[in-house]
Amino acid sequence: MRGLTVNGRPVAAAAERSAGRRPPRDLSRLRGPALDLGFVLGAMLDVFLNPPREAEPYMHVLSGLACVALVLRRRFPFAVTLATVPGFLTGWSELAAMIALGTLARRRLWGWQTAVGAVLVAFCRFMRWPPAEFVQLEWRQHLLNLIYGCIVAGMPVALGLLLAARQELSSRIRELAASREREQQLHAQAVRAEERARLAREMHDLVSHQVTLIAMQAGGLQVAARDEDTRHAARTIRDLSTRTLDELRQLVGVLRTSPAEDGESPGLDRLGDLVRGCDTEVSVRVEVAVEQLPPAVSAAGYRTVQEALTNVRKHAPCASATVLVRAEDGWLLVEVRNTAPHRAPAAPLPSGGHGLMGLRERAALLGGTCQARPTEDGGFLVRVRLPLPGGKG
């Protein structure tokens, strides 16, 4: 089985190397405040080292406020961008406005707030203050200011969008590596379960048949024997054969279930933790006592919800999902349905479909069914039906 690769390199290995290059947690916490302080100091140097000779006091104040406002650029990017406009329009805090606009583009992507901020920053570079000086400029100077205004506003927007796309791509690669590892584990478990089931069938069909014949022959010999030694030997053979059959039935039962070394698999009782850790809007409705479900059925239902929500996050960003778990006519129904995505993924990622294949194999091993198909409203539906003990299935 080949692992998923990106640019010829395994995704899991790339993710591990990327994780290995990450700075320690303490340094990561300090990097953000240090970067904010650097931006504020850089903007202040740009303002206080290059003041116009005929600048009014209010121009100095507005330009300085534009630099100080950068402290809040992460929490309120749009408001900070608006706060830098007066200082850029009447003063010369150009660098502060560009930093605020770049942060806005990275946080809000290309939305109406970013568009408004870009237009205002471009206008501040195009406009000359006071307005009387702006009117006196020639058309060539107006055209040149317009070109520089588009550059001053376009560069931070492009850089912010590029950084946002890089961050989202890195996050999706890590999710893809984790999903791929989970798919491989599910497939390996399915292969092992199929092999155990095959061994159980062969042991039941061959060994138990031969041992049963031995027990029957020993029983007949015990009745037909005339001396006590022969009857005692036949009785011993029959007892050993019966005990061997009981142990064989227990062994076959173990082979048909998950072995202890596979570890305890999470079940539907941990569905709340799964939903809380998912970066997707999910509504859950459980209409069955999950504590009373067989471990294998509960684990299969949990894996179904886990894989379906992973696919929603991977292929349908910004979409909401609903999870339904209920019992009907002796079957456990697990259904995960998501709405149509509001936007396509920034960087479409490849998928081999092994996750859904693993769900079908797991359901088939338990005697159930798995359906996965698009819905009429543009969403996607994953429905798994698993038989319950004593049910009609």
Image (cartoon, helix red, strand yellow):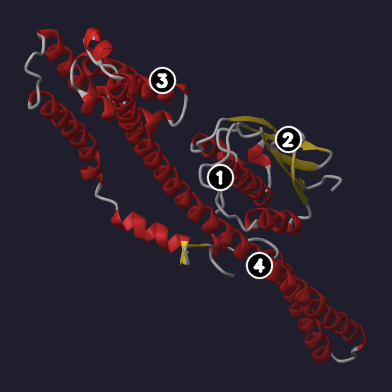
Q: Secondary structure at mark 1?
A: helix
Q: Nearer the viewer, mark 4 or mark 3?
A: 3
What residue is shown with label 1? Answer: 314
Find residue 231 and report its image quarter: bottom right
Going from N to C along the chain, the mark reached first, 3 or 2, is 3
Mark 4 to mark 1: distance in Å? 26 Å
What residue is shown with label 3? Answer: 116
Residue at left offset 31%, top offset 21%: 142
Q: Nearer the viewer, mark 1 or mark 3?
A: 3
- Callout 2 touching callout 1 (CB < 8 Å): no
Residue closest to the eye, 250 or 75? 75
Kind of residue at badge 4: Val
Kind of residue at badge 3: Val
Neighbor class of circle 2 (other Cα within 10 Å; few <14, some 14-19, many 20+) is some
Going from N to C along the chain, the mark reached first, 4 or 1, is 4
Find residue 325 and report its image quarter: top right
Q: Is residue 200 left or right of residue 76?
A: right
Mark 3 to mark 2: distance in Å? 49 Å
Neighbor class of circle 1 (other Cα within 10 Å; few <14, some 14-19, many 20+) is some
Going from N to C along the chain, the mark reached first, 2 or 1, is 1
What residue is shown with label 2? Answer: 326
Q: Secondary structure at mark 3?
A: helix
Going from N to C along the chain, the mark reached first, 1 or 3, is 3
Kind of residue at badge 2: Arg
**Percent coordinates x, y for residue 79 in the rendering:** 33, 17
What residue is shown with label 4? Answer: 191
